[in-house]
Image (tube, grey):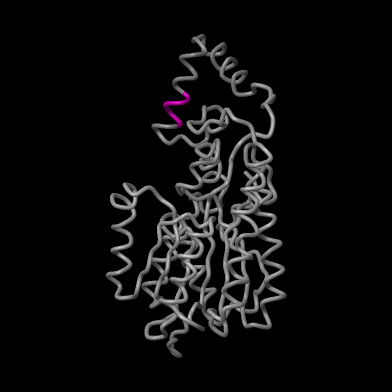
Amino acid sequence: MNDSNPLDFHGSDRWAVILGGSSGFGLATAKRLARAGFNILIGHKDKEGTVESVIKPHFDEIRKTGVKLVTHNVNLFDDEGRGEVFESIMTNAGLGKVHLFMQSIAAGSCRLMIEDKTPDFRGRAIQGLADALGLPAEKVKAAVNAAFHDKGCDALHTLADSRIPYREELLTQDDLAKTIFMMGYDYLLWSRELCKEGLFTKDARVVAMTSEGNEVAWKGYAAVSAAKTALEASCRAMAVELAPYGVSSYIVQAGITDTPAGNAIPNFDLMKAQARIRNPFHRLTTPEDIAETILGLCGPTLRWANGTILRIDGGEAISGL
């Protein structure tokens, strides 16, 4: 680390291990930390065609910074995949070199828990407009959807139809169990093993991502919301139990962000429109906003924020409409 610039890690031989680093927050963080001098190890699970056509150029960009980049396209939730990644950390980073461990995996089920019986407020509003205008309701509906989806008229989000509908299948007990494990306490298990094996630096950081869905109930988000609660509980536990080993634990709560994971959430197109209106800066959070924050967490100034949920959303969560 450079004494004159505590966020310059060139020559430090420090590593960032990022699970879910092929897109969204994880990829943006990998790029930012690479520019700051971190070596990067990424675990991810993507189709081979996607890796070649979409992801590889981003990985090439990281390599051009001159740092080491190691990637593993494996199932991070079975013994074989976990073992491969863990062995790679041991071999490539080695003891006492992992300064950041980040969990940015989106692998949960976004399904309704029960059949939706919400009154059709949207349909009633469309019909009211149609009657007032003397037009067929279908024509008004088509105009609203075109204006919203094609012309960027965000204020129509309460009337437009989402292009990301609810899944037909309802949430199952197995969905809940898997989601809470994969997006919740699995973060704790990885962090514990890295600590037990002595792979962390003497002042390491562990970071995971949450969302406003940890407190606000979004339809179809029940399993992920439960997982985020488990994730946050894990963060608090690690903040206490890993601190004697020099490890600080953080959760970053991002605002609504246009990522592949986000766009798997039902009604996310409507949520993005609402966020642009609601946010004091009238834009979405970006993965780069989050990456800058995580780089800041790697330096010395925010270490005392151990155990904190950091809301990085431009004021979105506290803003009224």
Depth check: give the residue in front, 134 or 78: 78
Depth check: give the residue in front, 4 or 281: 4
Quadrant placement of the C terminus: top right
Total marks drawn?
A: 0
- Residue at the bottom extreme, as displayed: 3
Answer with left or right where residue 105 lies relative to residue 8.
Answer: right
Identify the residue shown where x is 51% and y is 73%. Answer: 100
Q: What residue range appears in magenta?
A: 144-148
Quadrant placement of the N terminus: bottom left
In the image, residue 118 sits, relative to residue 36, either above or below, namely above
Identify the residue shown where x is 40% and y is 33%. Answer: 151
In the image, residue 3 sits, relative to residue 232, either above or below, namely below
Quarter holding residue 70: bottom left
Q: Position of residue 201 (x, y in %)?
A: 53, 82
Q: Position of residue 80 (x, y in %)?
A: 49, 59
Identify the residue shown where x is 57% and y is 11%. Answer: 131
Depth check: give the residue in front, 277 or 35: 35
Answer with left or right where residue 188 lies relative to residue 139.
Answer: right
In the image, residue 101 sits, relative to residue 150, either above or below, namely below
In the image, residue 303 sits, relative to residue 187, either above or below, namely below
Q: Position of residue 92 (x, y in %)?
A: 41, 76
Q: Position of residue 180 (x, y in %)?
A: 65, 51
Depth check: give the residue in front, 159 or 8: 8
Quarter holding residue 113: top right
Task: State the predominant SS element of the stretch in magenta.
Answer: helix
Q: Is residue 51 magenta?
A: no
